[in-house]
Amino acid sequence: MRELFDLSEKYGFKAPLVDAPESLDLKLYLRLCGALSISPITIAVISDIFIAIQDIEERIASFQYIAERINRKVSNIRHHLVILEKANLIKSEFITTDPIRRRRGKIFTLVIPKGQTVAAADYSSVPDGDSYQLVSSNTVETIDIDRYDDKTRFLELQIVRYLVKAMRTNRKDKAGTINVKLKVDGRVKPISITSRAEEGRLIYLPDMSYYAGAITWLINHISERVEQADTIGETFTLPLEPLISMAKDISLSDSSAGGYMNNAIQSLQRISATTFDMRDLYGQDHSTIKDIEMYYKLFRLEALVTYEDEKKIEKKAAVVQFPRSTVKNIIAAVRAEKSLNEMLLIDSDI
């Protein structure tokens, strides 16, 4: 019987557990579910479970944790996992997470059966997303924008170098504010940054993948509008499926899954709810300006819209207002054909 005491000590997880190995190909797994006539409800539940587990380094989580993340009862999760186990899409084994009494529990591992035919799973019918500029969720620093020859990574901008220091890095952290002081070469005083959130929804560092997706979409959109000489405002309606596809490096067809959609909406809400208060930006560098207190948001989420596309399928879009400085700098950079390292998304003195 395997001993998984480290999960109990690190996360407080108790058996039963679900394991979605990092090597598991979710696209293949879901297509195989379809080929084996697994119900759409079970497929939706397992998709949500897979997405919920991605925040855990070991890709293993307790039923209780998953139930809270995807808003389902523990008994309901067990029901769907047993269905998949009967279809040989899950294997279970006895383990223990109790270092004292060593109580026996189960771990359910998502697997693709060896030798299982997947001929019924039609890969050619699913868009591969190659026509979209995808943003890897593993490391948002490696985002490339194809229209620029130098392939500059826009998330190496100073906005990331500074503001990320005031973002949550622990998913269990319930703090409503974070205070940091950042020493900068040539300045007497460190820059003071306080991040604060409405209703306690402070931005979580992985949320930056969705910000990266939104900015990538915005750059492409502004580039098209500039070419057409249209008037460009500050508020834009972003379809969520392309944004998720870019943020999580998945196909458009997969981005419509309920788990991805819910995670994206929650991330957009946290980004919108977080304000960064910044002080001691100027000091001795300016003869007349002694200091400026800035209150900065990456963007503001104004509305979520549910609509029907031309095929009468329900879709969702986010109405987002970006800072005017962000929009103006992107417009200027696109018109001047500048590389992205010249597009400062916040005040240049930062």
Image (cartoon, rainbow, N blue to C red):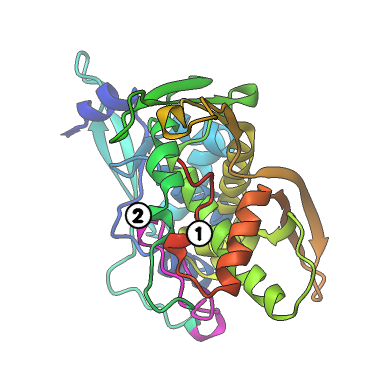
Mark pair 1, 2: CA separation: 20 Å
Mark drawn on residue 335: none
Q: Which residue is mark 2?
A: 139
Q: Nearer the viewer, residue 64 or 38?
A: 64
Residue 81 visible to an observer of this rendering: no
The residues colored magenta run 124-146
Q: Which residue is mark 1?
A: 343
The image shows residue 38 at horizontal and vertical percentages of 54, 62
Residue shown at the point (27%, 29%) measured from the top left: 7
Looking at the image, residue 278 sits to the left or right of residue 4; the answer is: right
Determine if the magenta segment contains residue 139.
yes
Residue 223 visible to an observer of this rendering: yes
Q: Nearer the viewer, residue 343 or 263?
A: 343
The image shows residue 327 at horizontal and vertical percentages of 65, 57
Looking at the image, residue 181 sits to the left or right of residue 43; the answer is: left
Residue shown at the point (60%, 65%) measured from the top left: 332
- Give the quadrant of residue 76: top right
Compared to residue 33, the image places residue 196 above or below, namely: above
Quarter holding the C terminus is: top left
Residue shown at the point (56%, 53%) measured from the top left: 260
The image shows residue 238 at horizontal and vertical percentages of 69, 60
The residue carrying pointer 2 sits among few (fewer than 14), some (14 to 19) or many (20 or more) residues within 10 Å by Cα, namely few
The image shows residue 167 at horizontal and vertical percentages of 44, 33
